[in-house]
Amino acid sequence: MHEMTATNLRSAYGGESMAHMRYRTWGRHAVEAGFPNVGRLFQAIAYAEEVHANNHFRELGAESGAFPVTSAAGFGLGSVSEHLAGAIEGETFEIEEMYPTYKQTAQFQKEPGAVKSFHYAVSAEQIHARMYTDAKKTVDAGKDIELGPVQICETCGYTVEGEAPEVCPICQRREFRAFP
Ligand code: FE2
Ligand code: FE2
Ligand code: FE2
């Protein structure tokens, strides 16, 4: 694999791994703060980030060894609204800068597996940014969000509220994990 794409996959793995843990932490905090549905949204999306991390790791395949990994990551414990703002900021960075750049590089380097892994991630991040933005408006009005079951595609992390679709619109697979 070309070095630039391998570096980007490792960086994205680091970013997704931290996003997974950060959302788990912020999700528990939201439940404790009296926002159980925001907590469930964080836990569901945390799983989507785990799917992305696993995809990137798998694409690295035999590129084994120890590497220093640089990943932009938000830190801090504050209010539920501040955590949602941090989540929106992270997802937006991934949508507007990180994944488009990584995907273009992988296309240039003719690494189709990495292109797919980055494409799956950025498709889900766009949905995450919207869901967190909607949630923040409600939380800023002092209320927990209304939230039906959340479904996460186990292959690409596609995220949808309500019933799982017959077929995932991003990757065409049929297996979803529900956060009811
Ligand atoms: Fe992700
Ligand atoms: Fe995300
Ligand atoms: Fe999918």
Image (tube, grey):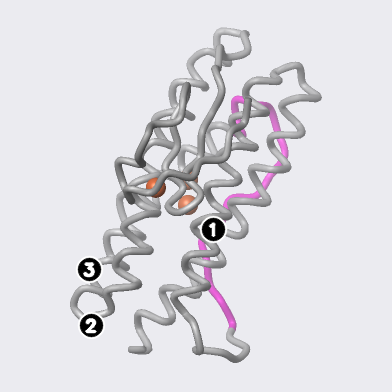
Residue range corresponding to the magenta coloring: 68-83
Q: CA distance from mark 3 to mark 1?
A: 19 Å
Q: Determine which residue is flagged by label 3.
A: 104
The answer, for residue 64, to whether it is visible in the render is yes
Disc 1 marks which amino acid? Glu
Horizontal arrangement in the rendering, residue 163 relative to residue 18 (left or right): left
Image location (x, y in percent) of residue 161? 47, 25
Disc 2 marks which amino acid? Gln
Q: Determine which residue is flagged by label 1.
A: 16
Q: Residue most toward the left?
A: 108
Pointer 3 and pointer 1: residues touching (CB < 8 Å)? no
Badge 3 or badge 1: first in the primary sequence: 1
Disc 3 marks which amino acid? Gln
Image location (x, y in percent) of residue 39? 67, 28
Residue 75 on the magenta span: yes
- 109 relative to 44, above or below: below
Is the CB of mark 1 within 8 Å of ligand 1?
A: yes
Badge 3 or badge 2: first in the primary sequence: 3
The residue shown at (60%, 45%) is 46
Pointer 2 and pointer 1: residues touching (CB < 8 Å)? no
Label 1's element?
A: helix
